[in-house]
Protein backbone atom coordinates (compact mmCIF):
# COMPACT_ATOMS: atom_id res chain seq x y z
CA UNK A 1 0.00 0.00 0.00
CA UNK A 2 1.49 3.26 -1.08
CA UNK A 3 2.50 5.69 1.54
CA UNK A 4 0.97 9.12 1.41
CA UNK A 5 3.28 11.87 0.29
CA UNK A 6 4.63 14.01 3.06
CA UNK A 7 5.11 17.12 0.85
CA UNK A 8 2.89 20.02 1.86
CA UNK A 9 -0.16 20.59 -0.30
CA UNK A 10 -0.55 24.11 -1.66
CA UNK A 11 -4.09 25.38 -1.76
CA UNK A 12 -4.96 28.67 -3.52
CA UNK A 13 -7.73 30.49 -1.81
CA UNK A 14 -9.47 33.59 -3.02
CA UNK A 15 -9.90 36.19 -0.41
CA UNK A 16 -13.57 37.04 -0.13
CA UNK A 17 -14.28 40.65 0.72
CA UNK A 18 -17.28 40.86 2.93
CA UNK A 19 -19.91 43.31 2.07
CA UNK A 20 -23.23 44.17 3.52
CA UNK A 21 -24.30 45.18 6.95
CA UNK A 22 -22.21 42.57 8.70
CA UNK A 23 -18.96 43.88 7.27
CA UNK A 24 -19.33 47.34 8.76
CA UNK A 25 -18.39 50.62 7.17
CA UNK A 26 -15.46 50.59 4.72
CA UNK A 27 -12.90 53.38 4.89
CA UNK A 28 -12.11 55.08 1.57
CA UNK A 29 -8.45 55.59 0.66
CA UNK A 30 -8.26 59.28 -0.43
CA UNK A 31 -4.61 58.93 -1.40
CA UNK A 32 -5.54 56.93 -4.58
CA UNK A 33 -8.67 58.92 -5.50
CA UNK A 34 -8.10 61.07 -8.69
CA UNK A 35 -8.82 64.77 -8.59
CA UNK A 36 -11.57 66.33 -10.70
CA UNK A 37 -9.05 67.86 -13.15
CA UNK A 38 -7.21 64.57 -13.57
CA UNK A 39 -10.47 62.71 -14.03
CA UNK A 40 -11.57 65.23 -16.71
CA UNK A 41 -8.25 64.99 -18.59
CA UNK A 42 -8.38 61.19 -18.52
CA UNK A 43 -11.94 61.23 -19.86
CA UNK A 44 -10.99 63.65 -22.66
CA UNK A 45 -7.93 61.56 -23.56
CA UNK A 46 -9.99 58.35 -23.76
CA UNK A 47 -12.58 59.98 -26.01
CA UNK A 48 -9.93 61.52 -28.28
CA UNK A 49 -8.18 58.16 -28.49
CA UNK A 50 -11.40 56.39 -29.50
CA UNK A 51 -12.14 59.17 -32.03
CA UNK A 52 -8.62 58.90 -33.51
CA UNK A 53 -8.87 55.12 -33.88
CA UNK A 54 -12.30 55.48 -35.53
CA UNK A 55 -11.08 58.10 -38.02
CA UNK A 56 -7.98 56.02 -38.84
CA UNK A 57 -10.08 52.94 -39.58
CA UNK A 58 -12.49 54.92 -41.74
CA UNK A 59 -9.61 56.49 -43.68
CA UNK A 60 -8.10 53.05 -44.38
CA UNK A 61 -11.50 51.69 -45.40
CA UNK A 62 -12.09 54.65 -47.74
CA UNK A 63 -8.62 54.24 -49.21
CA UNK A 64 -9.29 50.57 -50.04
CA UNK A 65 -12.63 51.47 -51.65
CA UNK A 66 -11.06 54.21 -53.79
CA UNK A 67 -8.27 51.83 -54.88
CA UNK A 68 -10.79 49.18 -55.92
CA UNK A 69 -12.86 51.80 -57.80
CA UNK A 70 -9.81 53.07 -59.71
CA UNK A 71 -8.78 49.50 -60.62
CA UNK A 72 -12.26 48.77 -61.92
CA UNK A 73 -12.40 52.06 -63.76
CA UNK A 74 -9.01 51.47 -65.38
CA UNK A 75 -9.91 47.91 -66.36
CA UNK A 76 -13.31 48.96 -67.72
CA UNK A 77 -11.71 51.78 -69.73
CA UNK A 78 -9.21 49.40 -71.30
CA UNK A 79 -11.97 46.94 -72.09
CA UNK A 80 -14.14 49.60 -73.68
CA UNK A 81 -11.17 50.92 -75.67
CA UNK A 82 -10.40 47.42 -76.99
CA UNK A 83 -14.02 46.90 -77.96
CA UNK A 84 -14.04 50.26 -79.77
CA UNK A 85 -10.86 49.38 -81.66
CA UNK A 86 -12.29 46.00 -82.70
CA UNK A 87 -15.53 47.62 -83.89
CA UNK A 88 -13.57 50.26 -85.82
CA UNK A 89 -11.43 47.54 -87.46
CA UNK A 90 -14.52 45.54 -88.44
CA UNK A 91 -16.18 48.64 -89.90
CA UNK A 92 -13.07 49.50 -91.93
CA UNK A 93 -12.78 45.94 -93.29
CA UNK A 94 -16.48 45.87 -94.13
CA UNK A 95 -16.29 49.21 -95.87
CA UNK A 96 -13.20 48.21 -97.89
CA UNK A 97 -14.75 44.86 -98.75
CA UNK A 98 -18.01 46.48 -99.82
CA UNK A 99 -16.20 49.01 -102.01
CA UNK A 100 -13.78 46.50 -103.65
CA UNK A 101 -16.20 43.57 -104.13
CA UNK A 102 -17.90 45.04 -107.25
CA UNK A 103 -14.53 45.66 -108.88
CA UNK A 104 -13.50 42.07 -108.14
CA UNK A 105 -16.75 40.83 -109.67
CA UNK A 106 -16.21 43.02 -112.75
CA UNK A 107 -12.68 41.61 -113.20
CA UNK A 108 -13.94 38.04 -112.85
CA UNK A 109 -16.67 38.53 -115.48
CA UNK A 110 -14.22 40.17 -117.85
CA UNK A 111 -11.78 37.27 -117.51
CA UNK A 112 -14.61 34.80 -118.13
CA UNK A 113 -15.75 36.65 -121.27
CA UNK A 114 -12.29 37.17 -122.72
CA UNK A 115 -12.09 33.70 -124.47
CA UNK A 116 -15.60 34.15 -125.87
CA UNK A 117 -14.71 37.58 -127.24
CA UNK A 118 -11.48 36.32 -128.81
CA UNK A 119 -13.21 33.29 -130.39
CA UNK A 120 -15.97 35.47 -131.82
CA UNK A 121 -13.41 37.89 -133.29
CA UNK A 122 -11.57 34.96 -134.93
CA UNK A 123 -14.87 33.79 -136.46
CA UNK A 124 -15.58 37.31 -137.66
CA UNK A 125 -18.54 37.75 -135.36
CA UNK A 126 -19.39 40.49 -132.85
CA UNK A 127 -19.56 39.15 -129.25
CA UNK A 128 -22.70 41.07 -128.38
CA UNK A 129 -23.68 38.64 -125.60
CA UNK A 130 -20.28 39.03 -123.90
CA UNK A 131 -20.39 42.83 -124.12
CA UNK A 132 -23.92 42.91 -122.69
CA UNK A 133 -22.87 40.73 -119.79
CA UNK A 134 -19.83 42.93 -119.06
CA UNK A 135 -21.97 46.09 -119.32
CA UNK A 136 -24.58 44.74 -116.92
CA UNK A 137 -21.82 43.80 -114.49
CA UNK A 138 -20.45 47.38 -114.74
CA UNK A 139 -23.90 48.84 -114.13
CA UNK A 140 -24.32 46.64 -111.08
CA UNK A 141 -20.88 47.87 -109.94
CA UNK A 142 -21.92 51.51 -110.36
CA UNK A 143 -25.24 50.92 -108.59
CA UNK A 144 -23.46 49.22 -105.68
CA UNK A 145 -21.05 52.17 -105.29
CA UNK A 146 -23.87 54.71 -105.41
CA UNK A 147 -25.95 52.68 -102.93
CA UNK A 148 -23.03 52.48 -100.51
CA UNK A 149 -22.36 56.19 -100.74
CA UNK A 150 -26.07 56.88 -100.35
CA UNK A 151 -26.30 54.71 -97.23
CA UNK A 152 -23.52 56.71 -95.60
CA UNK A 153 -24.43 60.13 -96.97
CA UNK A 154 -28.13 60.10 -96.06
CA UNK A 155 -27.58 59.96 -92.26
CA UNK A 156 -24.98 62.72 -92.49
CA UNK A 157 -27.24 64.97 -94.58
CA UNK A 158 -30.16 64.22 -92.27
CA UNK A 159 -28.07 65.17 -89.23
CA UNK A 160 -27.01 68.44 -90.90
CA UNK A 161 -30.62 69.28 -91.77
CA UNK A 162 -31.70 68.44 -88.24
CA UNK A 163 -29.05 70.71 -86.73
CA UNK A 164 -30.00 73.54 -89.08
CA UNK A 165 -33.67 73.10 -88.22
CA UNK A 166 -32.98 73.08 -84.49
CA UNK A 167 -30.62 76.07 -84.81
CA UNK A 168 -33.19 77.98 -86.83
CA UNK A 169 -35.87 77.29 -84.26
CA UNK A 170 -33.57 78.33 -81.44
CA UNK A 171 -32.57 81.56 -83.20
CA UNK A 172 -36.14 82.35 -84.10
CA UNK A 173 -37.01 85.48 -82.08
CA UNK A 174 -39.83 85.21 -79.59
CA UNK A 175 -41.84 88.25 -78.59
CA UNK A 176 -45.12 89.53 -77.28
CA UNK A 177 -48.18 90.65 -79.19
CA UNK A 178 -49.56 93.73 -77.40
CA UNK A 179 -53.34 94.02 -77.19
CA UNK A 180 -54.51 97.37 -75.86
CA UNK A 181 -58.23 98.03 -75.45
CA UNK A 182 -59.00 94.90 -77.55
CA UNK A 183 -56.77 96.10 -80.39
CA UNK A 184 -53.42 94.67 -81.42
CA UNK A 185 -51.01 97.62 -81.47
CA UNK A 186 -47.59 96.01 -81.88
CA UNK A 187 -45.08 93.24 -81.39
CA UNK A 188 -42.44 93.84 -78.67
CA UNK A 189 -39.54 91.89 -77.24
CA UNK A 190 -40.21 92.28 -73.49
CA UNK A 191 -42.89 93.85 -71.30
CA UNK A 192 -40.55 96.66 -70.27
CA UNK A 193 -40.88 98.05 -73.82
CA UNK A 194 -44.54 98.79 -73.10
CA UNK A 195 -43.63 100.36 -69.75
CA UNK A 196 -41.12 102.62 -71.49
CA UNK A 197 -43.76 103.57 -74.08
CA UNK A 198 -46.07 104.47 -71.17
CA UNK A 199 -43.37 106.74 -69.72
CA UNK A 200 -42.97 108.41 -73.12
CA UNK A 201 -46.71 109.10 -73.19
CA UNK A 202 -46.72 110.58 -69.69
CA UNK A 203 -43.91 112.93 -70.69
CA UNK A 204 -46.09 114.24 -73.53
CA UNK A 205 -48.62 115.63 -71.05
CA UNK A 206 -48.00 118.97 -69.41
CA UNK A 207 -50.49 118.21 -66.64
CA UNK A 208 -49.00 116.60 -63.54
CA UNK A 209 -51.84 114.09 -62.98
CA UNK A 210 -51.11 111.23 -65.39
CA UNK A 211 -51.98 108.28 -63.14
CA UNK A 212 -55.05 107.21 -65.15
CA UNK A 213 -53.66 107.71 -68.64
CA UNK A 214 -52.56 104.16 -69.48
CA UNK A 215 -54.88 101.15 -69.37
CA UNK A 216 -53.73 97.62 -68.58
CA UNK A 217 -52.52 95.79 -71.73
CA UNK A 218 -52.76 92.09 -72.63
CA UNK A 219 -49.72 90.16 -73.91
CA UNK A 220 -49.60 87.01 -76.06
CA UNK A 221 -46.32 85.14 -76.51
CA UNK A 222 -45.48 83.98 -80.04
CA UNK A 223 -42.59 83.54 -82.44
CA UNK A 224 -41.73 86.28 -84.88
CA UNK A 225 -42.62 85.55 -88.48
CA UNK A 226 -40.08 85.66 -91.26
CA UNK A 227 -38.63 89.19 -91.52
CA UNK A 228 -40.87 90.60 -88.79
CA UNK A 229 -39.31 93.33 -86.61
CA UNK A 230 -40.15 94.55 -83.14
CA UNK A 231 -42.26 97.67 -82.75
CA UNK A 232 -40.21 100.58 -81.40
CA UNK A 233 -41.12 102.17 -78.07
CA UNK A 234 -41.84 105.51 -79.71
CA UNK A 235 -44.13 103.96 -82.35
CA UNK A 236 -45.90 101.98 -79.64
CA UNK A 237 -46.52 105.21 -77.73
CA UNK A 238 -47.99 106.81 -80.87
CA UNK A 239 -50.37 103.87 -81.38
CA UNK A 240 -51.49 103.93 -77.74
CA UNK A 241 -52.31 107.63 -78.02
CA UNK A 242 -54.04 107.03 -81.36
CA UNK A 243 -56.67 104.75 -79.75
CA UNK A 244 -57.01 106.78 -76.55
CA UNK A 245 -60.09 108.89 -75.87
CA UNK A 246 -58.09 112.14 -75.74
CA UNK A 247 -57.93 114.45 -78.73
CA UNK A 248 -54.55 114.02 -80.39
CA UNK A 249 -52.62 115.75 -83.13
CA UNK A 250 -49.37 115.22 -84.97
CA UNK A 251 -46.93 117.72 -83.48
CA UNK A 252 -43.34 118.29 -82.40
CA UNK A 253 -42.49 118.00 -78.71
CA UNK A 254 -39.83 120.25 -77.17
CA UNK A 255 -37.63 118.50 -74.56
CA UNK A 256 -34.80 119.94 -72.47
CA UNK A 257 -32.80 117.35 -70.51
CA UNK A 258 -35.69 114.87 -71.11
CA UNK A 259 -38.20 117.28 -69.55
CA UNK A 260 -41.24 118.12 -71.70
CA UNK A 261 -42.08 121.81 -72.10
CA UNK A 262 -44.86 121.54 -74.69
CA UNK A 263 -45.51 120.71 -78.32
CA UNK A 264 -46.00 122.82 -81.43
CA UNK A 265 -47.59 121.91 -84.72
CA UNK A 266 -44.84 123.54 -86.78
CA UNK A 267 -41.24 122.95 -85.75
CA UNK A 268 -39.60 125.38 -88.20
CA UNK A 269 -40.05 128.57 -86.09
CA UNK A 270 -38.80 126.74 -82.99
CA UNK A 271 -35.69 125.45 -84.75
CA UNK A 272 -35.03 128.90 -86.23
CA UNK A 273 -35.21 130.44 -82.75
CA UNK A 274 -32.68 127.92 -81.41
CA UNK A 275 -30.35 128.60 -84.34
CA UNK A 276 -30.61 132.36 -83.79
CA UNK A 277 -29.54 131.93 -80.14
CA UNK A 278 -26.43 130.11 -81.34
CA UNK A 279 -25.67 132.80 -83.94
CA UNK A 280 -26.01 135.57 -81.37
CA UNK A 281 -23.48 133.84 -79.10
CA UNK A 282 -20.92 133.43 -81.90
CA UNK A 283 -17.76 135.50 -81.43
CA UNK A 284 -16.30 134.95 -84.89
CA UNK A 285 -13.38 132.94 -83.53
CA UNK A 286 -11.88 130.54 -86.05
CA UNK A 287 -12.95 126.90 -85.59
CA UNK A 288 -15.57 127.97 -83.05
CA UNK A 289 -18.31 125.42 -82.42
CA UNK A 290 -21.37 126.43 -80.40
CA UNK A 291 -23.78 123.90 -78.92
CA UNK A 292 -26.33 123.84 -76.16
CA UNK A 293 -24.97 122.55 -72.85
CA UNK A 294 -28.34 120.94 -72.14
CA UNK A 295 -29.82 118.07 -74.17
CA UNK A 296 -32.26 119.68 -76.62
CA UNK A 297 -34.70 117.49 -78.51
CA UNK A 298 -37.48 118.38 -80.96
CA UNK A 299 -39.32 115.06 -81.25
CA UNK A 300 -42.09 114.49 -83.84
CA UNK A 301 -44.98 112.26 -82.79
CA UNK A 302 -48.58 112.04 -81.65
CA UNK A 303 -49.37 114.46 -78.81
CA UNK A 304 -52.57 115.25 -76.89
CA UNK A 305 -54.24 118.47 -77.86
CA UNK A 306 -53.89 119.74 -74.28
CA UNK A 307 -50.08 119.71 -74.62
CA UNK A 308 -49.99 122.06 -77.60
CA UNK A 309 -48.51 125.43 -76.59
CA UNK A 310 -48.19 128.75 -78.33
CA UNK A 311 -45.00 129.47 -80.26
CA UNK A 312 -44.58 132.81 -78.46
CA UNK A 313 -44.74 131.28 -74.97
CA UNK A 314 -42.24 128.59 -75.92
CA UNK A 315 -39.86 131.19 -77.40
CA UNK A 316 -40.20 133.25 -74.21
CA UNK A 317 -39.21 130.21 -72.18
CA UNK A 318 -36.18 129.65 -74.39
CA UNK A 319 -35.08 133.29 -73.93
CA UNK A 320 -35.71 133.35 -70.15
CA UNK A 321 -33.22 133.22 -67.26
CA UNK A 322 -33.15 130.83 -64.33
CA UNK A 323 -31.67 131.10 -60.86
CA UNK A 324 -29.20 128.38 -59.96
CA UNK A 325 -27.18 127.62 -56.84
CA UNK A 326 -23.43 127.93 -57.17
CA UNK A 327 -20.62 127.25 -54.72
CA UNK A 328 -17.82 129.78 -54.15
CA UNK A 329 -14.62 128.53 -52.48
CA UNK A 330 -12.95 131.12 -50.27
CA UNK A 331 -9.35 131.86 -51.21
CA UNK A 332 -6.59 133.11 -48.96
CA UNK A 333 -6.93 136.90 -48.65
CA UNK A 334 -10.64 136.97 -49.46
CA UNK A 335 -12.82 139.38 -47.50
CA UNK A 336 -16.62 139.85 -47.65
CA UNK A 337 -16.28 142.99 -49.75
CA UNK A 338 -13.85 141.28 -52.13
CA UNK A 339 -16.16 138.27 -52.55
CA UNK A 340 -19.05 140.65 -53.22
CA UNK A 341 -16.97 142.41 -55.90
CA UNK A 342 -15.95 139.10 -57.53
CA UNK A 343 -19.44 137.59 -57.65
CA UNK A 344 -21.43 140.77 -58.24
CA UNK A 345 -23.78 139.93 -55.35
CA UNK A 346 -24.49 142.35 -52.46
CA UNK A 347 -23.02 141.31 -49.13
CA UNK A 348 -26.54 141.16 -47.61
CA UNK A 349 -27.53 138.55 -50.22
CA UNK A 350 -24.42 136.48 -49.49
CA UNK A 351 -25.14 136.69 -45.74
CA UNK A 352 -28.79 135.67 -46.27
CA UNK A 353 -27.66 132.51 -48.09
CA UNK A 354 -24.94 131.81 -45.48
CA UNK A 355 -26.42 132.90 -42.10
CA UNK A 356 -23.51 131.55 -40.01
CA UNK A 357 -20.93 133.51 -41.98
CA UNK A 358 -20.43 136.21 -39.34
CA UNK A 359 -20.17 133.63 -36.54
CA UNK A 360 -17.55 131.36 -38.12
CA UNK A 361 -15.83 134.04 -40.23
CA UNK A 362 -13.95 133.39 -43.44
CA UNK A 363 -11.23 130.79 -43.85
CA UNK A 364 -9.44 129.44 -46.93
CA UNK A 365 -11.24 126.48 -48.48
CA UNK A 366 -14.60 127.45 -46.97
CA UNK A 367 -17.52 127.01 -49.39
CA UNK A 368 -20.21 129.67 -49.69
CA UNK A 369 -23.63 129.20 -51.30
CA UNK A 370 -24.47 131.80 -53.94
CA UNK A 371 -27.48 132.33 -56.20
CA UNK A 372 -26.68 133.26 -59.78
CA UNK A 373 -28.96 133.99 -62.74
CA UNK A 374 -28.02 132.39 -66.04
CA UNK A 375 -29.78 131.85 -69.39
CA UNK A 376 -32.21 128.95 -69.55
CA UNK A 377 -30.58 127.79 -72.79
CA UNK A 378 -27.01 127.40 -71.58
CA UNK A 379 -24.50 127.57 -74.45
CA UNK A 380 -21.17 125.81 -74.68
CA UNK A 381 -18.58 127.24 -77.03
CA UNK A 382 -15.56 125.19 -78.11
CA UNK A 383 -12.73 126.67 -80.15
CA UNK A 384 -9.02 126.24 -80.82
CA UNK A 385 -6.71 128.92 -79.50
CA UNK A 386 -3.00 129.43 -80.24
CA UNK A 387 -1.15 131.62 -77.74
CA UNK A 388 2.25 132.12 -76.20
CA UNK A 389 2.93 131.61 -72.51
CA UNK A 390 5.95 131.81 -70.29
CA UNK A 391 7.78 128.72 -69.13
CA UNK A 392 8.80 129.11 -65.47
CA UNK A 393 12.44 128.62 -64.68
CA UNK A 394 13.75 126.28 -62.02
CA UNK A 395 15.55 127.48 -58.90
CA UNK A 396 18.67 125.67 -57.79
CA UNK A 397 19.61 126.39 -54.16
CA UNK A 398 23.24 126.28 -53.03
CA UNK A 399 23.36 125.97 -49.23
CA UNK A 400 26.20 127.52 -47.23
CA UNK A 401 26.83 128.02 -43.52
CA UNK A 402 28.49 131.36 -44.19
CA UNK A 403 25.11 133.06 -43.95
CA UNK A 404 22.20 132.70 -41.53
CA UNK A 405 18.88 131.12 -42.41
CA UNK A 406 16.75 133.42 -44.46
CA UNK A 407 19.67 134.78 -46.47
CA UNK A 408 19.03 134.32 -50.16
CA UNK A 409 21.22 135.84 -52.82
CA UNK A 410 20.86 134.92 -56.51
CA UNK A 411 24.23 134.14 -58.08
CA UNK A 412 22.70 133.46 -61.51
CA UNK A 413 19.47 135.25 -62.32
CA UNK A 414 16.76 133.02 -63.75
CA UNK A 415 14.92 133.80 -66.95
CA UNK A 416 11.55 132.51 -68.01
CA UNK A 417 11.22 130.62 -71.26
CA UNK A 418 8.58 131.02 -73.93
CA UNK A 419 6.40 128.42 -75.63
CA UNK A 420 3.61 128.40 -78.21
CA UNK A 421 0.54 126.53 -76.97
CA UNK A 422 -2.35 125.16 -79.03
CA UNK A 423 -5.37 124.43 -76.85
CA UNK A 424 -9.02 123.46 -77.25
CA UNK A 425 -10.99 125.77 -74.94
CA UNK A 426 -14.58 125.19 -73.84
CA UNK A 427 -16.70 127.94 -72.28
CA UNK A 428 -20.24 127.95 -70.89
CA UNK A 429 -21.97 131.32 -71.12
CA UNK A 430 -18.58 132.95 -71.61
CA UNK A 431 -16.94 131.31 -68.56
CA UNK A 432 -14.10 128.89 -69.32
CA UNK A 433 -14.81 125.40 -67.98
CA UNK A 434 -12.07 123.31 -69.60
CA UNK A 435 -8.83 123.72 -71.51
CA UNK A 436 -7.24 120.78 -73.33
CA UNK A 437 -3.66 121.31 -74.44
CA UNK A 438 -3.20 119.95 -77.96
CA UNK A 439 0.40 120.96 -78.67
CA UNK A 440 3.35 122.80 -77.12
CA UNK A 441 6.29 124.25 -79.06
CA UNK A 442 9.25 125.62 -77.07
CA UNK A 443 10.36 128.97 -78.50
CA UNK A 444 12.88 129.97 -75.82
CA UNK A 445 14.33 127.70 -73.16
CA UNK A 446 14.23 128.93 -69.54
CA UNK A 447 17.45 129.73 -67.63
CA UNK A 448 17.80 128.05 -64.23
CA UNK A 449 18.29 130.46 -61.34
CA UNK A 450 21.00 129.65 -58.81
CA UNK A 451 20.49 131.03 -55.29
CA UNK A 452 22.91 131.04 -52.34
CA UNK A 453 20.95 130.03 -49.21
CA UNK A 454 22.18 130.49 -45.63
CA UNK A 455 21.88 127.56 -43.19
CA UNK A 456 22.92 129.10 -39.83
CA UNK A 457 20.12 129.31 -37.23
CA UNK A 458 18.99 132.95 -36.82
CA UNK A 459 18.64 134.62 -33.46
CA UNK A 460 15.12 135.42 -32.26
CA UNK A 461 15.57 139.12 -31.48
CA UNK A 462 13.20 141.90 -30.54
CA UNK A 463 13.42 145.11 -32.49
CA UNK A 464 14.06 148.11 -30.28
CA UNK A 465 12.79 150.61 -32.81
CA UNK A 466 9.66 152.40 -31.73
CA UNK A 467 9.52 150.66 -28.37
CA UNK A 468 7.93 147.50 -29.81
CA UNK A 469 6.87 145.09 -27.10
CA UNK A 470 6.61 141.26 -26.97
CA UNK A 471 3.52 139.53 -25.56
CA UNK A 472 3.78 136.49 -23.29
CA UNK A 473 2.57 134.36 -26.22
CA UNK A 474 5.80 135.10 -28.10
CA UNK A 475 4.25 137.58 -30.57
CA UNK A 476 5.24 141.25 -30.59
CA UNK A 477 3.30 144.40 -31.42
CA UNK A 478 3.35 144.48 -35.27
CA UNK A 479 3.93 148.20 -35.80
CA UNK A 480 5.41 151.30 -34.27
CA UNK A 481 3.01 152.52 -31.56
CA UNK A 482 -0.73 152.80 -31.95
CA UNK A 483 -3.72 151.03 -30.43
CA UNK A 484 -6.49 148.78 -31.74
CA UNK A 485 -9.55 150.77 -32.75
CA UNK A 486 -11.55 148.00 -34.51
CA UNK A 487 -11.37 144.48 -33.13
CA UNK A 488 -12.28 141.05 -34.49
CA UNK A 489 -15.88 141.16 -35.72
CA UNK A 490 -16.01 144.94 -35.26
CA UNK A 491 -18.21 145.00 -38.35
CA UNK A 492 -19.70 142.16 -40.43
CA UNK A 493 -16.95 140.05 -41.99
CA UNK A 494 -14.05 141.70 -40.16
CA UNK A 495 -11.51 138.91 -39.54
CA UNK A 496 -8.70 140.80 -37.77
CA UNK A 497 -7.86 143.99 -35.88
CA UNK A 498 -7.15 147.49 -37.23
CA UNK A 499 -4.29 149.64 -35.86
CA UNK A 500 -4.39 153.22 -37.25
CA UNK A 501 -0.92 154.67 -37.98
CA UNK A 502 0.46 157.33 -40.33
CA UNK A 503 1.39 156.31 -43.86
CA UNK A 504 4.88 154.86 -44.09
CA UNK A 505 5.01 153.66 -40.44
CA UNK A 506 7.12 150.46 -40.35
CA UNK A 507 5.34 147.13 -39.97
CA UNK A 508 7.28 144.48 -37.97
CA UNK A 509 7.22 140.70 -38.15
CA UNK A 510 5.25 139.68 -35.03
CA UNK A 511 7.34 136.47 -34.85
CA UNK A 512 10.12 134.81 -36.82
CA UNK A 513 9.01 132.92 -39.89
CA UNK A 514 9.09 132.57 -43.65
CA UNK A 515 7.26 134.80 -46.10
CA UNK A 516 4.47 132.61 -47.50
CA UNK A 517 2.65 135.13 -49.67
CA UNK A 518 3.08 138.64 -51.07
CA UNK A 519 0.15 140.20 -52.94
CA UNK A 520 -0.06 143.56 -54.73
CA UNK A 521 -3.75 144.25 -55.31
CA UNK A 522 -6.00 147.27 -55.60
CA UNK A 523 -9.05 145.63 -53.98
CA UNK A 524 -9.76 143.70 -50.80
CA UNK A 525 -6.65 143.59 -48.61
CA UNK A 526 -4.69 145.67 -51.12
CA UNK A 527 -0.96 145.05 -50.68
CA UNK A 528 -0.43 142.44 -47.96
CA UNK A 529 2.10 139.94 -46.58
CA UNK A 530 1.50 136.52 -45.02
CA UNK A 531 4.13 134.98 -42.71
CA UNK A 532 4.23 131.27 -41.90
CA UNK A 533 5.72 130.66 -38.45
CA UNK A 534 6.08 126.91 -38.93
CA UNK A 535 3.99 125.79 -35.94
CA UNK A 536 0.53 126.09 -37.48
CA UNK A 537 0.41 129.88 -36.94
CA UNK A 538 0.29 132.40 -39.76
CA UNK A 539 -0.03 136.18 -39.57
CA UNK A 540 -1.34 138.63 -42.17
CA UNK A 541 -0.39 142.31 -42.59
CA UNK A 542 -2.76 144.16 -44.98
CA UNK A 543 -3.34 147.58 -46.65
CA UNK A 544 0.42 148.27 -46.82
CA UNK A 545 1.76 151.15 -48.87
CA UNK A 546 4.98 149.23 -49.61
CA UNK A 547 6.32 145.70 -49.09
CA UNK A 548 10.00 145.07 -48.29
CA UNK A 549 10.22 141.24 -48.39
CA UNK A 550 9.84 138.50 -51.02
CA UNK A 551 8.18 135.11 -51.00
CA UNK A 552 10.40 132.43 -49.45
CA UNK A 553 12.49 134.89 -47.46
CA UNK A 554 13.09 134.13 -43.78
CA UNK A 555 12.53 137.08 -41.40
CA UNK A 556 13.36 137.48 -37.73
CA UNK A 557 10.93 138.77 -35.14
CA UNK A 558 10.95 142.55 -35.30
CA UNK A 559 12.26 142.81 -38.87
CA UNK A 560 10.57 145.48 -40.98
CA UNK A 561 8.51 143.72 -43.64
CA UNK A 562 6.21 146.51 -44.93
CA UNK A 563 4.92 150.05 -44.39
CA UNK A 564 1.48 151.19 -43.25
CA UNK A 565 -0.84 152.46 -46.01
CA UNK A 566 -4.44 152.47 -47.21
CA UNK A 567 -4.40 150.24 -50.33
CA UNK A 568 -7.37 148.05 -51.23
CA UNK A 569 -10.76 148.54 -49.58
CA UNK A 570 -9.66 150.96 -46.89
CA UNK A 571 -10.94 154.36 -45.69
CA UNK A 572 -7.74 155.46 -43.92
CA UNK A 573 -4.10 154.61 -43.21
CA UNK A 574 -3.97 151.62 -40.85
CA UNK A 575 -2.55 148.13 -40.41
CA UNK A 576 -5.06 145.28 -40.71
CA UNK A 577 -3.51 142.41 -38.69
CA UNK A 578 -4.75 138.79 -38.54
CA UNK A 579 -3.65 135.66 -36.68
CA UNK A 580 -4.69 132.22 -37.91
CA UNK A 581 -3.99 128.77 -36.49
CA UNK A 582 -4.22 125.90 -38.99
CA UNK A 583 -6.37 128.20 -41.15
CA UNK A 584 -8.79 129.05 -38.32
CA UNK A 585 -9.24 132.76 -37.55
CA UNK A 586 -7.97 133.61 -34.03
CA UNK A 587 -8.44 136.79 -31.99
CA UNK A 588 -5.22 138.84 -32.36
CA UNK A 589 -5.81 140.50 -28.97
CA UNK A 590 -4.88 137.21 -27.31
CA UNK A 591 -1.44 137.30 -28.96
CA UNK A 592 -0.35 140.94 -29.20
CA UNK A 593 -2.32 142.42 -26.24
Image (spheres, grey):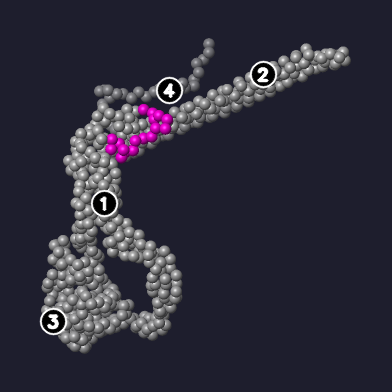
Q: Which residue is mark 4?
A: 12
Nearest the eye: 164 or 32: 164
Whether residues under marks 2 and 3 lie with C-beta atoms below 8 angstroms apart, the answer is no
Q: Which residues are magenta?
A: 222-239
Is 326 rendered above or below residue 407?
A: above
Viewport quadrant of the C terminus: bottom left
What's the CA distance linking mark 2 and mark 4? 109 Å
Tell which tag, 2 or 4, sits nearer the viewer. Answer: 2
Crowdedness near tag 3: few (<14), some (14–19) or many (≥20) residues, C-alpha within 10 Å: some
- Which quadrant of the figure has residue 568? bottom left
Q: CA distance from mark 4 to mark 3?
A: 125 Å
Residue 238 visible within the image = yes
Q: Residue at point 34% right, 65% down?
A: 284
Label 3 SS: loop
Which residue is under mark 2?
143
What is the C-alpha distance between the residues marked 3 and 1?
70 Å
The answer to whether residue 251 is magenta is no
Q: Nearer the viewer, mark 2 or mark 1?
A: 1
As drawn, the label of residue 483 is: 3
- Camera-near label (1 vs 4) is 1
Asked if disc 2 and disc 1 are in contact, CB closer than 8 Å, the reply is no
Q: Earlier in the sequence, mark 2 or mark 3?
A: 2
Q: Is residue 223 magenta?
A: yes
Q: Residue at x 16, y 62 (%)?
A: 354
Q: Is there CB contact under 8 Å for labels 4 and 3?
A: no
Name which residue lies at 28% across and 29% down: 183
How far across and how far down the image is residue 36, in percent?
30, 38
Amino acid sequence: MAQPSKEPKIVHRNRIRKTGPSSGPRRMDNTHRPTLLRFTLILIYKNLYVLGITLLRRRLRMRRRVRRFLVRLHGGSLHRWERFREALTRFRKKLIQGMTAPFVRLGTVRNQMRPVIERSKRDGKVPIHAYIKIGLTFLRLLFTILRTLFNYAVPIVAAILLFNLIGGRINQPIGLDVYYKDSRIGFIEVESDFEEAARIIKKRYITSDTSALIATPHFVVREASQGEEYTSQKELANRILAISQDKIVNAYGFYVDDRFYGAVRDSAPLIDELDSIKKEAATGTEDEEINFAKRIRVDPGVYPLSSIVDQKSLKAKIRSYETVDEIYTVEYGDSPSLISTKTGLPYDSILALNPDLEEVGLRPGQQLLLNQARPFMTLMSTYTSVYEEEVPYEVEEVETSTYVKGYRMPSVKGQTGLQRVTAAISTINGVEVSREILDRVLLRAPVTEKVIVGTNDPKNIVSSSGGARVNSSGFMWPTQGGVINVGLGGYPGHTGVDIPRPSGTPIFAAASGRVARVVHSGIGYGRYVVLDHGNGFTTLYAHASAIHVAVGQYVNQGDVIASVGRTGNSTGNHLHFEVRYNGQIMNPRNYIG
